[in-house]
Amino acid sequence: MTRRVRWLALGAALGAGGAVWSQRRLATLAERARSGAVPADVVRLVDRGSRRLGRHVAVSVAAGRADARRREMELRRVVEHRPSRPFVG
């Protein structure tokens, strides 16, 4: 019986704490929305995302070029070591 009471008390405490936290968080967000800080946050997030995307694309292009060079060298080695046969057409 004491376990049930303990779990009930713990659940009530967590529920009350969560309600207070969410109420404070919503109040803070509402104040930021009224003050105009949210549009600045959106611009900052978009800017950060575009920079991250640019870096990702640059790294991907560099990796693709390196793989293409490596594959070209492999193919050239295969073609150069192949015995040449006259073309019969």
Image (cartoon, helix red, strand yellow):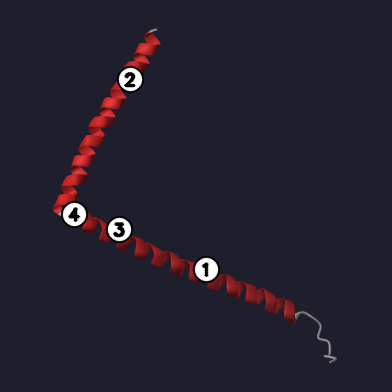
* Kind of residue sitting beneath label 2: Leu
What x and y, as percent, mark residue 12?
30, 21
Label 2 and label 1: CA atoms lie apart by 53 Å
| Residue ID for mark 4 | 37
Image-quadrant location for residue 10: top left
Residue 45: assigned label: 3
Q: Residues within 10 Å of mark 2 (few under 14, many from 20)?
A: few
Three-letter code, disc 3: Leu
Nearest the viewer among 71 and 87 is 87
How much space separates mark 4 and mark 1, taking CA atoms?
A: 39 Å
Q: Quadrant of the image for the N terminus?
A: top left
**Residue marked by disc 2:** 10
Q: Which residue is at a point 84% across and 90% down the rendered structure image? A: 86
Q: Nearer the viewer, mark 2 or mark 1?
A: 2
Q: Residues within 10 Å of mark 1 (few under 14, many from 20)?
A: few
Is tag 3's residue or tag 2's residue first in the polypeptide sequence? 2
**Label 2 near label 3: C-beta < 8 Å?**
no
The tag on residue 63 is 1
Q: Earlier in the sequence, mark 3 or mark 4?
A: 4
Q: CA distance from mark 2 to mark 4?
A: 37 Å
**For residue 8, above or below residue 28:** above
In the displayed structure image, the side of residue 25 where residue 56 appears, left or right? right
Q: How many numbered dots are placed on residues in this image?
A: 4
| Marks 3 & 4, CB-CB < 8 Å contact | no
Q: Residue at x 16, y 55 (%)?
A: 36
Taking depth in this image into account, of 69 and 38 the one nearest to the observer is 38
State the separation of the CA atoms marked 3 and 4. Answer: 12 Å
Q: Position of residue 39 (x, y in %)?
A: 22, 58
